Amino acid sequence: MSSSEHPAADAVREHILPDADSAIRWFEHGYPHPLVRWHHHPELEIHLIRSSTGTALVGDAAVAFAPGDLFLIGGNLPHNWVSAVAPGSVIERRDALVQFAPGLLERMAGDVVDLSATTRLLERSLHGTMYLGDAARFGGEALLAMRGTTGLARFSRFLHLLSVLLEASPEEQLSLSSAPAGAPLPSGESELIAEAFAYVQEHLHDPLRLSDVAEHLGLSTSSTSRLFTRATGLGFAQTVTRLRLSEARRLLRTTDLKVAEICWRVGYTSLSNFNRQFRQEVGGSPREYRRLAVSADR
């Protein structure tokens, strides 16, 4: 993949304001919020979803999220969480997160041998990791316990959070983006990217065509195609497929709708094609996914 096709190329560069009292920035916000957009930053981020369901976009990955889901995002890996809510809906506290400098774990590991294992989190963060099961539950509790703390109290809770993530079993970790983020390029197209994603998300149930999105954006089809490739590292068709299957996973996890109804709702006109692509993407059938997801949520 060339640098011009990198997933981070058109993500907004978010400038993180450091916390004067701690090396660890703890933050929470609602939805919608100015920070809820396709963006990246050099700092690593551990992100907890507290409310709503929707689609997490991380690099070239699209996965369904629900309350309690926990993510580790590497430096300069573009990301966004899009809640599936009615227009005009407001969620007071949807997200809680910590952010820290990319060199922090290396410095800690270099100075304190007891912390050498934390560098493994750097490798996991490059592609983004979604934590499941006990890792997400206990990690979320550890992250929320940092709220209102400063100094050594915050740092000690941060170390506990890292410990929880390091102890997660392979079954509790889902690697996300197929391509890791590198040095992002300056972007002048971030608003177009955001608008393109919003349009696709809103019309997933329609027979989406590249020309439809191009007309909405006021661009040529070739320019729109390059826009999607630069933003996600994928072509338009594959991006739409991943978003549709992500929405299908969300509906399987959060509703009692029949598989056929979900198939139509996310824009498929053939149930067999939906089942085939779902199995290719997820590794099992929609019914198998629902059974495992419901069991994991209990």
Image: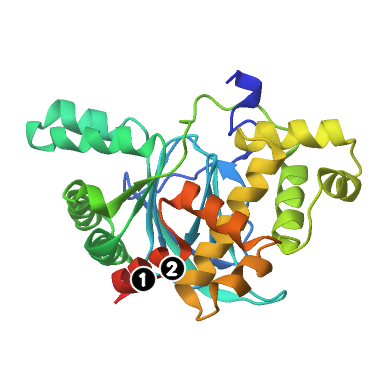
Give the Cα separation between the discs numbered 1 and 2: 6 Å
Q: Is residue 189 left or right of residue 93?
A: right
Could one spot residue 279 in this view of the protein?
Answer: yes
Going by the numbered disc 1, the residue's amino acid type is: Arg
Residue 267's quadrant in the figure? bottom right
How crowded is the residue under tag 2: few (<14 C-alpha within 10 Å), some, or many (20+)? few
Picture layout, residue 295 above or below residue 47: below
Picture layout, residue 44 above or below residue 276: above
Residue under the image location 33 percent in, 50 percent down: 21
How crowded is the residue under tag 1: few (<14 C-alpha within 10 Å), some, or many (20+)? few
Residue 287 is tagged as: 2
Q: Is residue 59 left or right of residue 116?
A: right
According to the picture, the residue beneath numbered tag 1 turns out to be 291
Location of residue 169 in the rendering, given as x and y in whole percent from the top left corner: 19, 50
Residue under the image location 56 percent in, 64 percent down: 248
Residue 100 is tagged as: none
